[in-house]
Amino acid sequence: MTSRILLRELAHWLEQVTRGYAFPAPEGGERDARVYLHALPDGQPGTEESPSYPFVVVRWMEGTVQSESDAKTVLKDTVGLALGVHSPRSQEEAGLCLAELVDLLRRELWTLRLLAGRFELEEPIRASIPEPKRKWNQFHLATIETVWNYTWPPRGWAELSPLLGGSTQEKS
């Protein structure tokens, strides 16, 4: 459940970071990047729910749980950000806009480093464009891979339940 909190907090933070930082829109003009959890929506083209450039998809990739010598439980979650930028003018401009979005997010992530007072960003922050044989789409898509660590509190359920809308009674 803590991974769920991480994903929601990161998506909310990304919406704030990209607000007011516009990129070319396929229908012309410019717009802020839309932030989606897990995948692009399945909406029909031209509707508000339709996927459209520019976008950032926040997706959980993998995680570990490890006991430390001080009896703390440390979790690490890898969260991928899939970025998409479009330019109706040229692929060159789309690629440069993508590099700008990657730079913006890496800089802001590096500055943030601590999310929601509990999730700590680990080094390095990896960014890449999918390889041609495994690409998700055209070259103006990229990924940023982030790793976040956090410690489960000794009475984790008591702390997490109110955040998830559940009971404050400790679960066993």
Image: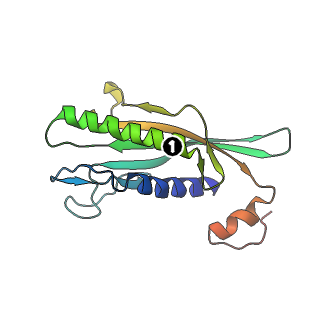
> At 46% from the left edge and 39% from the top edge, which residue is drawn?
107
Q: Within the image, what quadrant is residue 69 found in? A: top right
Residue position for label 1? 109
The one nearer the camera, 110 or 84, is 110
Q: Where is residue 144? Give x, y as percent.
A: 45, 37
User: Left or right: where does residue 78 sit relative to residue 57?
Assistant: right
**As displayed, is residue 34 above or below residue 79?**
below
**As displayed, is residue 132 above or below residue 80?**
above
Q: Within the image, what quadrant is residue 84 found in? A: top left
User: Left or right: where does residue 46 sit relative to residue 20?
Assistant: left
Q: Within the image, what quadrant is residue 75 found in? A: top right
Mark 1 is surrounded, within 10 Å at the Cα level, by few (under 14), some (14 to 19) or many (20 or more) other residues, namely some
Indicate the quadrant containing the N terminus: top left, top right, bottom left or bottom right: bottom right
How is the rendered protein coloured? Answer: rainbow
Q: Where is residue 139? Give x, y as percent.
A: 27, 32
**Residue type, mark 1 in image:** Leu
The one nearer the camera, 91 or 107, is 107
- The answer to whether residue 96 shows anywhere in this view is yes
- The answer to whether residue 79 shows anywhere in this view is no
> At 33% from the left edge and 25% from the top edge, which residue is drawn?
133
User: Left or right: where does residue 9 sit relative to residue 134?
Assistant: right
Q: Where is residue 74? Give x, y as percent.
A: 73, 44
Q: Total of numbered circles in the picture? A: 1
User: Left or right: where does residue 164 sit relative to residue 20?
Assistant: right
Residue at disc 1, secondary structure: helix
The one nearer the camera, 118 or 61, is 118
> At 29% from the left edge and 48% from the top edge, which residue is drawn?
54
Indicate the quadrant containing the C terminus: top left, top right, bottom left or bottom right: bottom right
Residue furthest out toward the right: 70
